[in-house]
Image: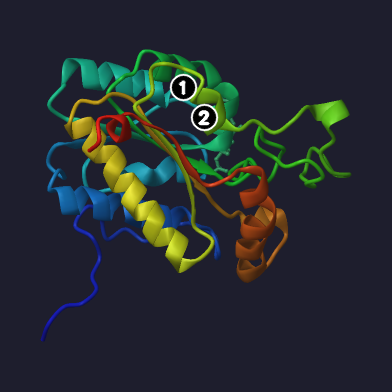
Amino acid sequence: MQTVFQKPEALTDVQMHYCPGCTHGIIHRLVAEAIDSLGIREQAIGVASVGCSVFAYDYFNCDMQQAAHGRAPAVATGIKRVRPDNIVFTYQGDGDLASIGMAEIVHAAARSENITVIFVNNAIYGMTSGQMAPTTLLGQKTATSPRGRTAEEMGYPIKMCELLATLEGPAYLTRVSTHDSRHVLQAGRAIKKAFEMQQQKKGFALVEVLSTCSVNWGMTPVDALKWVEQNMVPYYPLGVYKDVTAKEGN
Ligand SMILES: Cc1ncc(C[n+]2csc(CCOP(=O)(O)OP(=O)(O)O)c2C)c(N)n1
């Protein structure tokens, strides 16, 4: 019988712990599919961060290293510099990357470290049960903004792709989403391209993936996907923010 669908080799058989409706599992699969299709599983080294994806080291079937909260780009920098022939990626949430890890990501991008960053933006601190993140939308209710985020009190949500696009360093910056199957397929293509950029030694590549946290948002999984489309996408426009290969006509 012909196999039409199977688990990517780059995922282990360990059952994931993610909540119903969470899109971390989908994004794990997209990363694993990209690794499989490029044939780089033996070369790949992932850096797991701290957040709901803290157990990523159990789920990816490649070498993995755990970093302290926010420090994954610094750890990935070290690994890539001593092992330049390996393909090194980080997998980070928005609390991890855009709050405590802001300095690490900005400097890794400015240095154009030849690493691939998977940035999962679910607009909240998921693992610690729903506090406001730097990416929480204005008006969004969280455990620490129970009446909704206001610009006056809490400032504006940070748009990481736009911010990093002001730097000379990055080679590839793109924002994709997981709110329906068409966008999931697009996200997969972007993640694969971000790994290819590293293979071609182009420098720093980051894929921001808009994601859900239905449990901490207090929504059903279906409503959470609609919320991404109706609320996150307008504030965080999808698209390519930087692509040095486009200039080269590749
Ligand atoms: C140095 C340090 N500070 C704070 C924490 C607590 N902490 C663990 S996970 C987390 C937030 C994670 O949120 P995010 O990165 O958005 O990922 P998500 O869980 O939503 O996927 C925080 C603040 C920690 N583990 N270490």
Specify the quarter for ligand 1: top right
Drawn side of residue 180 relative to residue 151, left or right: left
Q: In the image, residue 16 lies at what x, y percent?
A: 41, 58
Label 2 crowding class (10 Å Cα cut-off): few <14, some 14-19, many 20+?
many
Q: Residue at x 59, y 33 (%)?
A: 95
At 54% from the left and 61% from the top, the residue drawn is 179
Q: Is mark 2 within 8 Å of ligand 1?
A: yes
Task: Please state which amino acid type lies under the numbered disc 1.
Answer: Ile
Front-most of residues 80 and 200: 200
Q: Quadrant of residue 148?
A: top right
Q: Is residue 73 above or below residue 197?
A: above
Name the spot of residue 191 as percent of width and height, x first.
33, 46
Quadrant occupied by the N terminus: bottom left
Circles 1, 2 touching at the beta carbon (< 8 Å): yes
> Which residue ends up furthest to the bottom in the rendered image?
1
Q: Secondary structure at mark 1?
A: helix
Q: Earlier in the sequence, mark 1 or mark 2?
A: 2
> Residue type at mark 2?
Leu
Q: Is residue 119 above or below residue 228?
A: above
Spatial separation of the CA atoms under disc 1 and disc 2:
7 Å
Residue identified by numbered label 2: 97
> Disc number at residue 118?
none
Which element is circle 2 on? helix
**Figure coloring:** rainbow
Image coordinates of residue 214 in percent, x first then y, are: 64, 59
In this picture, is 129 found above or below 111? below
Residue occupying image coordinates x 16% and y 48%: 38
Residue 5 percent across, percent down from the top left? 24, 74
- Return the residue at label 1: 105
